[in-house]
Image (tube, rainbow, N blue to C red):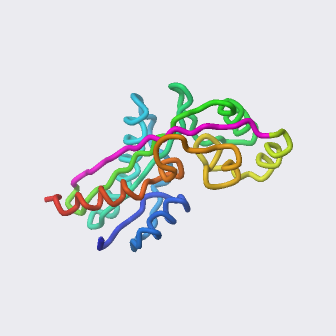
Amino acid sequence: MIVDSLVLASASPRRREILHRLGLDFEVIAPGGDGPEVAGSPRNQVLGYARWKAEVVHKEQADRVVLAADTLVFLDESALGKPSNKEQARLMLESLFGRTHKVWTGACLISQSGSVFETADCAVVEFDIPDKEDFGDYLDGNEWADKAGAYGIQGWASRWARVVEGEEETVIGLSSKAVVALLAKLTLAP
């Protein structure tokens, strides 16, 4: 799969790792924010945020292919974004313990000609209740920072969280299958 001039519109090291595993050459240009609030279904929200990121970067890099993604954790119908401090992380995580929740990741690809391709995936995650000391150590370690729902399933939280439906990469922040499917659509772009 050869794509010239690919830009990842994300500062996420996890998304970079996924693209590297796919063997893609790309440049990272973060859009600087998540954009205006998006309403609607979980799918519409993650697609809206991903589209905004892609559009912001594509305006400055119109001669390049831009890929952006956004991930949100949904408990019942409420979105849990990134916590702004340790107390907010504690409250978010405590609301997840002993329950299942959904994680949605939306991805948007804009071709050099301006064609827009999008996809969204959902995974279901089940959380155990960690022991108090382990949870305290997690909060003190700041791994919760800059993560939707205050956790990364590939990190420390893997002790308590597991994917029971869908793909782990969706929870991490970008599905390899979604990237491959979006890039395949470039051949159809005008």
- The image quadrant of residue 164 is top right
Q: Say if 135 sits above or below 115 in the image.
A: above
Residue 69 point in image, percent of width and height: 43, 51
Residue at the (69%, 43%) spot, across then down: 160
Q: Nearer the viewer, residue 94 or 127?
A: 127
User: Residue 35: x, y in percent?
Assistant: 45, 43
Query: Which quarter shows the N terminus?
Result: bottom left
What are the residue bounds of the magenta stretch?
115-130
Residue in the image at 50% along x and 25% along y = 77
* Nearest the eye: 106 or 132: 132
Q: Is residue 146 above or below residue 91?
A: below
| Residue 123 covered by magenta stretch | yes
- Name of the residue lying farthest toward the left: 190
Work out which residue is located at the far top of the displayed protein and give it.
Answer: 77
Q: Main secondary structure of the magenta part?
A: strand
In the rendered image, the vertical position of residue 138 relative to residue 12, given as above or below: above
Residue 29 within the magenta-colored segment of the rendering: no
Left or right: 12, with 90 as reference point: left
Expressed as whole percent of the image width and height from the top left, the position of residue 22 reads 41, 68
Residue 97, quarter of the rendered image: top right
State the quadrant of the C terminus: bottom left
Please give the name of the residue rendered at 44% of the width and 65% of the height, measured from the top-left corner: 19
Query: Relative to the observer, which residue lies in front, 105 or 111?
Result: 105
Q: In x, y percent, where is residue 188?
A: 16, 59
